[in-house]
Image: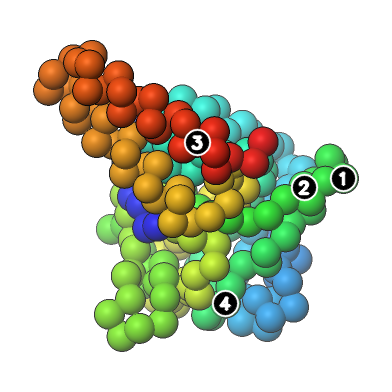
Amino acid sequence: MLLHLPAILHAEELSTAHAQLQQAPWQDGRDSAGGQAASVKNNTQLPRDCPAARSIRSLVLAALDRSALFFSAALPKQVFPPHVNRYAGEANHYGPHVDNAIRLLPDAGLRMRTDLSATLFLSDPDSYDGGALRIGQAPDAPRVKLPAGDLVLYDGTSVHEVEPVTRGERLACFFWVQSLVRDAAQRQILFDMDMALLDLRQRDGESPEAVRLTGCYHNLLRLWAEP
């Protein structure tokens, strides 16, 4: 899966986030990386418990809760508390890596599986050069650089990197999702079916066909979900 979710944060929420970041502290981003990732990671991020991080985390989690598209695509069981990172100056890139398969949820003492990775862009793309999120290693691998407030959701198994920022600063939130449906192919089928049902309802309303297909969707979800 590689999905662009537009306008997860609204303009006023972005303004709030940017105001919080004006006086925020930054620390070495390698503190949240595993062994292989830390060797290629060169950025900074907010300390998890600083006021700015807590405020922005609350904004993002509330925004995800209201996004029907995020729920349909991710079918979230657990969402890792979002971190905020920055690429600028000498700390300006993150080489090819794969995210850790298991993360420890802060303060909960529980572990979660990282089925999906997510980046929510906080900087306007015209305010910095470089900084694209490249997902995959093929020569034509997607390079993602989205408007502020937009989110990209992609498989946690993907090798990815953040290309060097050569002007300005790239600010973003990043987090992971453990899905109720572990298998990526099954998740994709459910998402495609849900989007098709949405189109069908918009065209025909609650037709008998839409009702039957909705039953099929929920029966598949019942079959595949791991509560």
167 vs 160, nearest the viewer: 160
**Earlier along the polypeptide chain: callout 1 or callout 4?**
4
Q: Do the residues labelled 1 and 3 touch (CB within 8 Å)?
A: no
Q: Are marks 4 and 2 in contact (CB under 8 Å)?
A: no
What is the CA distance from the residue labelled 1 to the residue labelled 3? 28 Å
Say which mark, if any, is on residue 91.
none
Q: Mark 4 points at which residue?
A: 97
Tell me the kind of residue under disc 2. Answer: Leu
Give neighbour class at mark 3: few <14, some 14-19, many 20+ (Cα, 10 Å): some
Q: Is residue 9 visible?
A: no
Give neighbour class at mark 2: few <14, some 14-19, many 20+ (Cα, 10 Å): some
Tell me the kind of residue under disc 3. Answer: Leu
Which picture quadrant has residue 62? top right
Q: Do the residues labelled 2 and 1 touch (CB within 8 Å)?
A: yes
Which picture quadrant has residue 44? bottom right
Q: Name the residue under label 3.
A: 221
Q: Where does the C terminus fall, quadrant-wise?
A: top right
**Earlier along the polypeptide chain: callout 3 or callout 2?**
2
**Earlier along the polypeptide chain: callout 3 or callout 4?**
4
What is the CA distance from the residue labelled 3 to the residue labelled 2? 25 Å
Residue 98 picture location, percent across and down:
58, 73
Q: Residue at x 49, y 43 (%)?
A: 74
Give neighbour class at mark 4: few <14, some 14-19, many 20+ (Cα, 10 Å): many
In the rendered structure, the answer to whether residue 10 lies left or right of residue 95 reads left
- Secondary structure at badge 3 equals helix
Q: Mark 1 points at which residue?
A: 109
Q: Name the residue under label 2.
A: 105
Tell me the kind of residue under disc 4. Answer: His
Residue 80 picture location, percent across and down:
66, 46
- Secondary structure at badge 1 equals loop
**Earlier along the polypeptide chain: callout 1 or callout 3?**
1
